[in-house]
Amino acid sequence: MGVNNFTYMLISILIMTGITYLLRVVPLIIFRKKIENRFVKSFLYYVPYAVLSAMTFPAIFTCTGNVYASCAGTAVSIILAITTENLVVCAVGASVIAYVFALTI
């Protein structure tokens, strides 16, 4: 690794660290009082679920390279999530079904 690559990587890490720090500290500085507005509270309650869904679902349908295997894995994971409520069982079951389904097609 050359000096230029090392300095580029170091500057990149410092910039990412600063941005991450700012994203965590700025809300604490801005919102010092308890949030009383019902709309804002409900909005903030659902934001993590919406962001996680927006990041996860595109990856689910593109990771296997086979849409049918992805749909089968998703269906099994939804069924297992409703019935078992165990994250490990849900993830392993969906992965196994998607893998087996991809092998058979």
Image (tube, helix red, strand yellow):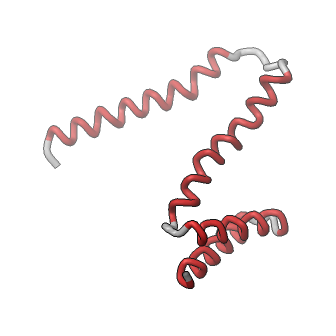
Rendered location of residue 92, percent (x, y): 65, 72
* Position of 45 relative to 90 (above/below): above
* Position of 45 relative to 81 (above/below): above
Q: Which image quadrant is residue 46 in?
A: top right
Left-right relation of 98 to 48? left
Q: Residue at x 55, y 77 (%)?
A: 102
Left-right relation of 13 to 4? right
Which residue sits furthest left? 2
Q: Residue at x 32, y 35 (%)?
A: 12
Left-right relation of 12 to 29? left
Picture quarter with the C terminus: bottom right
Rendered location of residue 8, percent (x, y): 24, 36
Left-right relation of 74 to 3? right
Rendered location of residue 86, percent (x, y): 76, 66
Rendered location of residue 54, percent (x, y): 62, 45
Q: Which image quadrant is residue 41 in?
A: top right
Numbered label tally: 0
* Position of 43 relative to 35 (above/below): below
Q: Residue at x 53, y 82 (%)?
A: 103
Q: Residue at x 62, y 16 (%)?
A: 29
* Position of 68 relative to 6 (above/below): below
Which residue sits furthest bottom? 104
- Camera-side residue of 34 and 39: 39
